[in-house]
Image: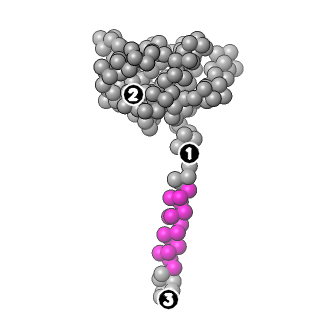
Amino acid sequence: MSRKLRYLVPLAVFLLLAGLLFRGLSLDPKLVPSPLIGKPMPAFTLPRLQDPDATISDADLRGEVFLLNIWATWCTACRAEHDVLLQLARTGKVKLYGLNYQDQRPDAQRWLRQLGNPYVANAFDADGRTGIDWGVYGAPETFVIDRDGIIRHKHIGPLTVEVVNRDILPLIETLKSGRS
């Protein structure tokens, strides 16, 4: 192998890898599709946040269109979206359930007392195992689930009024009308 070629091959490989890395870093992680879209929600049974002696499960949620919001008190973006969740809950257009993710129960209970509780109920996922089954990258994440328990949409990051009006509510309306 010539001396020149000996240096060009590693340089070409390096440039190719650098280009792939740069491309990967420029992608928006919120646009990464969930492999769960179109599939049944994962089975779970967890204690309720407010009452550790009571449970909530995937079976309890079937039969209605709803949102599942993954949140935690340690999550600053969750605080940013909280007012949007309260507004959405007040509209009565969709039931909102919470999955309190890798949190401390007293902290989460205090959060809801102080900031308001937009949720019909909250599952308490202290160790995060259920969140892993849902493919959670972090908090907040929000799922739209249809009457049959099929995941129809996943939003990564905090919900905004614009996202709710543009993406969430039209989908909810479609699912409720049976036009999915």
Residue 42, compared with residue 20, is above or below; it is above
Q: Position of residue 114 (x, y in %)?
A: 40, 17
Q: Which residue is mark 3?
A: 2
Amino acid type at circle 3 is Ser
SS class, disc 3: loop
Residue flagged by tag 2: what amino acid is it? Ala
> Which label belongs to residue 28?
1
Q: How far apart in space, not on screen, are marks 2 and 3 (Cα)?
A: 59 Å
Identified at 57% across, 29% down, the residue is 160
Whether residue 18 is in magenta: the answer is yes
Quick one: SS at disc 1? loop
- Taking depth in this image into account, of 80 and 21 the one nearest to the observer is 80
> Which is in the foreground here, disc 1 or disc 3?
1
Query: Which residue is labeled 2 in the image?
Result: 72
Q: Compare marks 1 and 3 and give the one earlier in the sequence.
A: 3
Position of residue 125 measured from the top left corner of the image (x, y, whole percent): 35, 25
Instruction: Measuring from the top left, give residue 54's x and y in whole percent.
Output: 33, 11
Cβ atoms under marks 1 and 3 closer than 8 Å: no
The C terminus sits in image quarter = top right
Give, as a three-letter code, the residue at label 1.
Asp
- Say which mark, if any, is on residue 120: none
Ranked by sequence position, the earlier of labels 1 and 2 is: 1
- Dot 1: few (<14), some (14–19), or many (≥20) neighbours within 10 Å? few
- Name the colouring of the figure: one colour
Magenta span contains residue 46: no
The magenta stretch is 8-23
- Please state the horizontal and vertical placement of residue 3, each as a whole percent of the image: 47, 88
**What separation in Å lies between label 1 and label 3 (alpha carbons)?**
42 Å
